[in-house]
Image: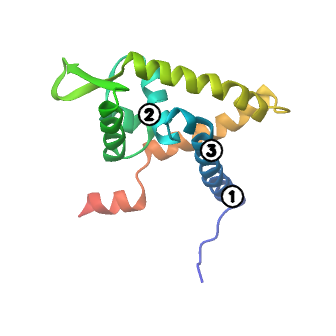
Amino acid sequence: MLEEQRSEAGEAVTELILDVFRLNGRLQIAGDRLVSGLGLTSARWQILGAIAYAEKAETVAWHARNMGVHRQGIQRIVNELKREGIVEFQPNPHHKRAQLVVMTPKGRDLYDAAIAMQIPWVNALATDLSPEEIAAAQKVIGQLKARLEEAPTSQDDSSSRS
């Protein structure tokens, strides 16, 4: 039996994490359904969104870090999107090998079509939720995300001591 027990807040955060995992799964399924007619998946749409919301053209590695996922997964999907003419690579003046990823006009049209479908869906999803409730949830999630970004995991910590 474990000697150390979760605090009340630790237990609540554990429940929140499990709910976030479940929410993520449901969002992926809903996103897949929403944009399947466009030939997109949630993963492809998420990458297009990351490109669209970036302040300037960025590399695959930058998008992966920003999204909190592995670069290899993003690279694979970006390569597929490139083959389909949805994104293209442009030279990076700061790095010879790490090219910048940008949407093509076809990609922009596809992304805009996905957003046109997302707007009524997300408005319905937000029914009966106040902006204050949503802001409170964002605050907690943002704090947890920041703590995860700044603190190494036990596994990361032990590997750095070897």
The picture places residue 36, in percent across and down from the top left corner, at: 56, 39
CA gap, disc 3 and disc 2: 15 Å
Which residue is painted at 57% across and 43% down in the image?
32
Question: Which residue corresponds to mark 2?
Answer: 47
Count of all numbered marks drawn on residues in the image: 3
- Foreground pick, 89 / 151: 89
Return the mark for residue 43: none
Q: Disc 1 to disc 3, how far (Cα)?
A: 18 Å
Q: Is residue 61 above or below residue 13?
A: above
Q: Secondary structure at mark 2?
A: helix
The reply to whether dot 3 and dot 2 touch (C-beta < 8 Å) is no
Q: Which amino acid type is shown beneath numbered disc 2?
A: Ile
Residue underneath mark 3: 27
Q: Is residue 142 above or below residue 161?
A: above
Q: Quadrant of the N terminus?
A: bottom right
Q: Position of residue 54 (x, y in %)?
A: 43, 21
Identify which amino acid the numbered label 3 is placed on.
Leu
> Residue 15 bears which disc, if any?
1
**In this view of the protein, which residue sits in the foreground, 145 or 20?**
20
